[in-house]
Amino acid sequence: MERTFVMVKPDGVERRLVGEIIRRFENRGLRLVGLRLLTPSREIAEAHYAVHRERPFFGELVDFVTSGPVVAMAWEGNQAISLVRTMMGALKPELALPGTIRGDYTTDIQTNLVHGSDAPETAGQEIALWFGADGLTN
């Protein structure tokens, strides 16, 4: 079993797509083990996107993620990280295939609805950042 972190970004919450996104992951057989609705602090957002700190878009990204509520989730299942990333679709809207979350619902690279961990190490760090040591169900 593998765990991964998923965040529905402010645009996804505003567009009322949280239920649809959860439904897709549940229908695929993944198990929801953590869920929080919150407006992230700048500190959490900057820590989450720290890998991009030196990139020109870092400030915009942090501003966007802190602009409204997000839904932070932890999912569990066989190959959860790769399954979630496949289901999310490509980051660039023009490359996101129909049937993926981004392919069905996005047209912009920044307001792309969801974030998902890209590796086991990242998933562990992100889950710890957003849920703490004991914030998940077993």
Image (spheres, helix red, strand yellow):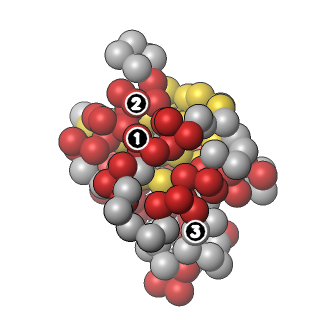
Contact flag, marks 3 and 2 (Cβ < 8 Å): no
Contact flag, marks 1 and 2 (Cβ < 8 Å): yes
Quarter of the image containing the C terminus?
A: top left
- Using the image as rendered, state which of residue 48 and residue 43 is in the foreground: 43
Of badges 1 and 3, nearer the viewer stands 1
Instruction: Estimate the spatial distance between the alpha carbons at disc 1 and disc 2, rounded to whole Å.
Output: 8 Å
Of badges 1 and 2, nearer the viewer stands 1
Instruction: Estimate the spatial distance between the alpha carbons at disc 1 and disc 3, rounded to whole Å.
Output: 18 Å
Q: Residue furthest bottom?
A: 94
Mark before the other along the chain sequence, 1 or 3: 1
* SS state under label 2: helix
Q: Residue furthest left?
A: 121
Vertical comparison of 119 with 69: above or below:
below
Identify residue for label 2. Answer: 129
Identify residue for label 1. Answer: 47
Q: Position of residue 64 (x, y in %)?
A: 63, 56
Q: Which residue is drawn at 59% across and 28% down?
A: 36
* SS state under label 3: loop
Q: What residue type is labelled 3?
A: Gln
Vertical comparison of 100 with 18: above or below:
below
Mark before the other along the chain sequence, 3 or 2: 3
Q: Residues within 10 Å of mark 2 (few under 14, many from 20)?
A: some
Q: What residue type is labelled 2?
A: Leu
Q: Position of residue 23 (x, y in %)?
A: 61, 46
Q: Where is residue 57 in the image (x, y as percent from the top left)?
A: 49, 68
Q: Which residue is drawn at 50% across and 36% down?
A: 43
Quarter of the image containing the N terminus?
A: top left
Identify residue for label 3. Answer: 110
